[in-house]
Image (cartoon, grey):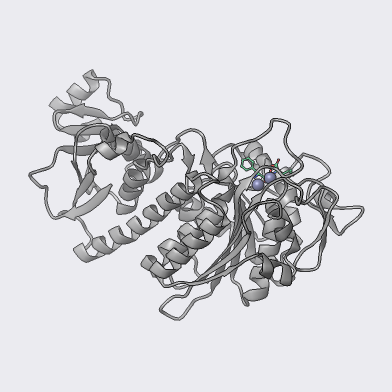
Amino acid sequence: MNIVLVQSKEKSIDIEIVVVKNLKDLKKSISKKLVTLGFSINSSEPLFLDNVVYVGVLKLKGEDLKIALSSVVQKIAKMKFEKIYINLTQSKKELTLKDIVEGTVLGSYIFDKYKSKTSAKNTKELILNIDISKSKHTQNDLVQELEQRLSIVNSVNMVRDFVNTTPEDFYPDTFAKNAQRIAKENNLECKIYGEDYLEKNGMNAMNAVGRASRHESKLIHLTYKPKKPSKGKIVIVGKGLTYDCCGLSLKSTGGLSMKCDKSGGCAVLGILNALSTLNYEYEVHGIIGAVENMIGGDAYKPDDVLVAKNGKTIEVRNTDAEGRLVLADCLCYAQDEIKDIDYIFDMATLTGACIVGLGEYTTGVMGHSEKFKKKLLTASKSSGELVGFLPSNRYLLNKMNSKVADITNSSSSRSGGAITASIFLDNFIKKENKKKWLHLDIAGAAYREESWGYNPYGGTGAGVRLILDFISQIKK
Ligand code: BES
Ligand code: ZN
Ligand code: ZN
């Protein structure tokens, strides 16, 4: 999808999009016809009439608008139109470029890498013309805004591509190569470490998880430094399990689809990819634990005791609770290497329990600071990414106790699995960073085998817009 801003309606357009919040805003003859054809503002089902496609919305902004536009572009994608036109002002209200760009570009995403014949490639590129002539903003502002919005959605779509790519084609070294490319294109610092480094630096928890894989584990550290003096430091640690077969604690159901288990790490790449265009004034560190969890003669086992980077000993009771082991060492690495952190996130497809608790579409958020959570909630509302907060308590703390080591990697009970996972991670957060840390469990939101709203089947790019909105909104 190509988007261009124009000063007035071009002659060569094929079709125009009209968003309808109130049928009274349309000419009587048209609204009459639409009603006859079954049009309703309560449904985002688009309706074609002459050279116009009408779509109903309850609100001319936010998720309502994005979902409506997404259903329009999805419908049009299968048709032979090339140039679609939309007026920035609809029903006397100026729409935001953010909503238009997210609805259309995120909504028209297609992943056809593995199709031998791609219907998508036969369709010509869609061009969305936006008439800005009546805008209250200057042309320059709108041009810059469009560039930034495109940078964000293109990063989200890049993350979706990564997540959807098979474990055969996307393994820890693929993570590293993409990180290097993104760093080069965006002027970022990029450090990549292999298993030698993990061993030398006591990152035994992370190292154990990747031991049975034919792919070397990689620790990736990307840094964005703002041009202006930095206002502070933000760290984002991502779980990058390019495949999680469960390890020796194999599920009785056998092999499972778990290419999505790299979604947290991929989101880190997406965030770092967008930053240089956005000119944010915070220093941002992205850290990815890129590992494959496999079985074999060298696999780590239930019963093993691992010593993490901070010296804590972990009794392995379930090799399928591998993400937290990788994150434990990555969190230690981040806090050892980066001083004076203002905010530290970890993002991971960590537990099935999070999906059970909050439903498929909501990211579970856990942490000690109510203030920090409130700020993230603001970013959730503005980005449209759903979050739900899961509370810990003193009794749950005991669930991660071990008789043989300092802690275990798997709770003694199945209940509250998303929360007990965050209690495990809390063991690797330094005292001074307790209130600066939030854990985001994106197990549900990052990948679905169904399309929802403007999210496609498969990878969604969850976390990218949420964190970018958070960074754009924080005031110290
Ligand atoms: N990667 C999974 C969690 C997951 C489940 C992600 C569903 C996406 C969709 C994680 O490594 C895992 O297996 N977690 C276990 C933890 C348990 C053994 C304590 C789980 O959720 O069952
Ligand atoms: Zn697992
Ligand atoms: Zn996993």
Q: Residue at x 19, y 40 (%)?
A: 82
Residue 321 position, x and y percent, is: 73, 47
Q: Is residue 400 left or right of residue 457?
A: right
Quadrant in the rendering for residue 210? bottom right
Residue in the foreground of this view, choosing between 392 and 463: 463
Residue furthest to the right in view is 403
Q: Is residue 15 left or right of residue 298?
A: left
Q: Is residue 269 left or right of residue 45?
A: right
Residue 430 visible somewhere in the drawing: no
Work out whether 432 lies above or below 161. Answer: below
Q: Residue at x 22, y 18 (%)?
A: 36
Q: How many marks?
A: 0
Q: Residue at x 65, y 42 (%)?
A: 354
Quadrant in the rendering for residue 333? bottom right
Residue 411 visible somewhere in the drawing: yes
Work out whether 276 lies above or below 349. Answer: below
Residue furthest to the left in view is 11
Residue 111 position, x and y percent, is: 40, 41
